[in-house]
Image: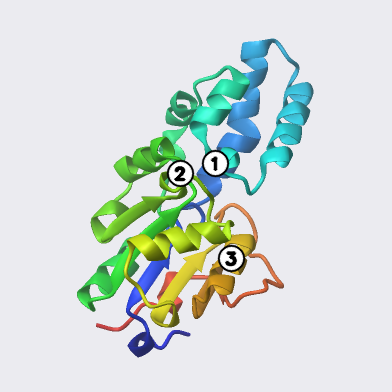
């Protein structure tokens, strides 16, 4: 699937790419609505409806990914609530093996994530992926999400890479759209970001089902 002789830099998303998206889906769709209902004395259905409406208004904006924003909006310590279900944080199969082999072959491995630093640090503390990365960048460092073209301008100003010789792996098509528009030549979309859900069909980018499909041979 990948001609590694044409790749110098690998940009990697975190949630749904290196890590199983089940944690995030469970937290935002089940755990947070339940705790929000308990805290504000709401019935579960009302809590779910209210949160979904709020989430929809912020989707693909930096606030959607910001634990500080949601803590202030909801009157809850979102990071503390994430720790309550942190046992669900898990790497996707062979994620560490991919990072290890990329490093062994001299590829530059950069994590670029929309996760807030609070969430990022929690997940790095619960997994081994940090040891296999050369650099970790949160979009909150730049004040704009990866969906924003300006994110890619900031990234290029701060990190040396040739877009024509760069591979980017993500599970979000809007993010991959922005990367393509910037000029990233090699793009893959994870087809099953949540291990508890089915593979997605009819993706607009080449689909990656398993890291074994692209692991370089050492």
**Label 3 belongs to which residue?**
178
Q: Secondary structure at mark 3?
A: helix
Residue at 49%, 21% (x, y): give it. Answer: 77
Q: Secondary structure at mark 1?
A: helix
Disc 1 to disc 3, C-alpha distance: 17 Å
| First-in-chain label (1 vs 3) | 1
Q: Looking at the picture, does residue 175 appear above or below residue 182?
A: above
**Label 1 belongs to which residue?**
65
Q: Is residue 21 visible?
A: yes
Q: Are marks 1 and 3 in contact (CB under 8 Å)?
A: no
Q: Are marks 2 and 3 in contact (CB under 8 Å)?
A: no
Badge 2 density bin: few <14, some 14–19, many ≥20, Cα 10 Å: some
Q: Quadrant of the C terminus?
A: bottom left
Residue 156 is situated, as x and y percent measured from the top left of the image, at 40, 66
Q: Looking at the picture, does residue 36 appear above or below residue 197?
A: above
Q: Secondary structure at mark 2?
A: helix
Disc 2 to disc 1, C-alpha distance: 9 Å
| In this rendering, the label closer to the viewer, 1 or 3 | 3
**Label 2 belongs to which residue?**
140
The number of discs equals 3
Between residue 139 and residue 17, name the one nearer to us. Answer: 139
Outermost residue, top side: 41
Locate residue 148: give its quadrant: bottom right
| In this rendering, the label closer to the viewer, 2 or 1 | 2
């Amino acid at each position: 699937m990948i001609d590694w002789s044409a790749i110098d830099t690998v940009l990697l998303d975190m949630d749904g790419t290196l890590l199983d998206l089940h944690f995030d889906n469970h937290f935002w769709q089940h755990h947070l609505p339940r705790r929000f209902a308990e805290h504000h004395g709401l019935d579960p259905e009302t809590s779910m409806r209210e949160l979904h409406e709020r989430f929809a208004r912020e989707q693909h904006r930096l606030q959607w990914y910001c634990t500080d924003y949601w803590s202030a909006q909801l009157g809850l310590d979102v990071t503390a609530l994430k720790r309550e279900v942190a046992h669900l944080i898990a790497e996707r199969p062979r994620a560490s093996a991919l990072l290890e082999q990329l490093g062994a072959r001299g590829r530059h491995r950069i994590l670029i994530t929309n996760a807030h630093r609070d969430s990022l640090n929690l997940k790095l503390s619960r997994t081994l992926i940090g040891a296999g990365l050369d650099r970790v960048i949160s979009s909150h460092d730049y004040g704009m999400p990866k969906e924003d073209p300006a994110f890619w301008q900031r990234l290029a100003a701060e990190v040396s890479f040739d877009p024509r010789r760069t591979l980017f792996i993500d599970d979000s098509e809007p993010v991959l759209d922005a990367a393509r528009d910037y000029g990233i030549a090699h793009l893959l979309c994870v087809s099953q970001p949540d291990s508890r859900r089915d593979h997605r069909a009819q993706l607009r980018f080449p689909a990656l089902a398993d890291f074994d499909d692209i692991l370089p041979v050492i």
